[in-house]
Amino acid sequence: MAPRGRKKRKTYHHGDLRAAILEAAVEVIRERGLVGLSLRECARRVGVSHAAPYRHFADKDALLMALAGEGFRELYEAGLEAMADLKEPRARLDAYGVAYVRFAIARPEHFRIMFASELDADAGTDEDRAASDAAFNLLDACSAALVPAEEVEAASVSYWSLVHGLSMLILDGRIPEEHLGSDAAVEALTRQMFARWRET
Amino acid sequence: MAPRGRKKRKTYHHGDLRAAILEAAVEVIRERGLVGLSLRECARRVGVSHAAPYRHFADKDALLMALAGEGFRELYEAGLEAMADLKEPRARLDAYGVAYVRFAIARPEHFRIMFASELDADAGTDEDRAASDAAFNLLDACSAALVPAEEVEAASVSYWSLVHGLSMLILDGRIPEEHLGSDAAVEALTRQMFARWRET
DNA sequence: TGTACATCAGTGAACGCGCGTTCACTGATGTAC
DNA sequence: TGTACATCAGTGAACGCGCGTTCACTGATGTAC
């Protein structure tokens, strides 16, 4: 509705400042890290006064929580979509795993914030909390279809560790480049890992 | 040699300011997170002027790199010690894995810094870089004793992901408390995870 | 269709703060003779 | 053992900066009549 341009607006109102600030925040984190993130810098990039973000976020933490929520929603959607056409439980689980790693690579800034313990778990809206629950429940559901009830938790924790660990190591630059060149390469690496994991 | 006391020194010289600052930094990170860390706050806690740390660290990044180096050295030592009496390759690998998770729990601040991509890989002394190489080579050595040469990398990545993921999830408070009550509980959880991992 | 008014989004000045880093200094320490 | 001196560790004032947050404001928008 209104221009999204980085620096100049013609209208007084922005149109979708909230979304623009979120976008800018991701950019800032990418360039300067979480430590370098500031509301003022986000405002600057969007071309808006430094107080404007306060119309949309109560404070800096609220911005971070919003990003985390966005991330969990996206992760959940991606997982759901990846499993959509699959019936076999193990295939569904592995599809979710691949989607998880893919998500981490596609949205590293979100991913890191989602799992940054720096944030008060108390903060964040109910909606955000629900989004994160949904993503985790999806994993448990996959496990439940695969192993006996009394082993679901253990299987979930184990599988999640595998997938989460790979994601983190990739984001931290600990995995040799040659495995990360393309989506297909990443999927191959991931599935090769899954091959070493047995459900029981 | 000199008092380590938090607030008051009798002597003009501190005695081991470098170590004291490192300790204080860990404390600050524990309380306020990486974002809340400042050299000035460390100096304050040690009871020293805010410029004093600059006698021991070129800048803030140097402090972080020193912590990371300390962490890698400790992780390496812990791994070595855990495997010391074991002969069987898989037992050695699992011992290293348990030590890894234990280390993450014992030194969460170090662990997070060691894997925080925020730092320039360029920074840090040669000694620090050697320490991190040593820790990783230990893992590769375990793999090499366990699987054929052409699978060593894949096995290492996979096992490392498992162990690293569990560590991260624990630090981020994503693992139910009942598994973390004691060293024994953590070891049980970890070994249960390893039981689902096959080397080939 | 036109007007009055309430509501909302963005402004810009101002606040107080803690930070990283530099610098000329001073007090303590240790070593050569 | 005693003294002179170089070296080193810690001091405290000062710099400039960007930040989070508040506030009274103004421009734009939409709605009721």
Image (tube, coloured by chain):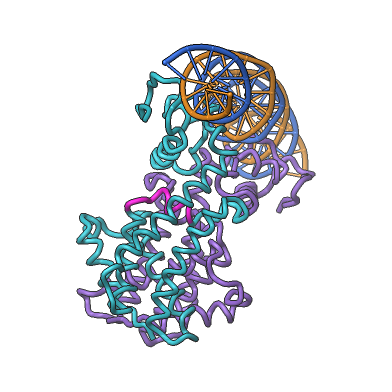
Chain colours: A cyan, B purple, C blue, D orange
Residue found 38% across the figure and 70% down from its top:
A162
Residue A105 placement: quadrant: bottom left
* In-image side of D17 versus B138 (left or right): right
Residue B25, visible in the rendered structure? no
Q: Main secondary structure of the magenta part?
A: helix
Q: Is residue B103 left or right of residue B181?
A: left
Residue that appears at 37% across and 59% down? A77
Q: In the rendered image, which quarter is residue B90 located in? A: bottom left
Q: Residue at x 51, y 38 (%)?
A: B58
Percent position (x, y) of residue D33? Answer: 58, 24
Horizontal and vertical percent for residue A155? 43, 79
Query: Can I make out residue B73 in this image?
Result: yes
For the N terminus of chain A, the quadrant is top left
Assess whether residue A30 is covered by the magenta stretch.
no
Depth order, front residue of A164/B46 = A164
Residue A127 in percent (x, y) is at: 53, 54
Front one among B6 and A153: A153
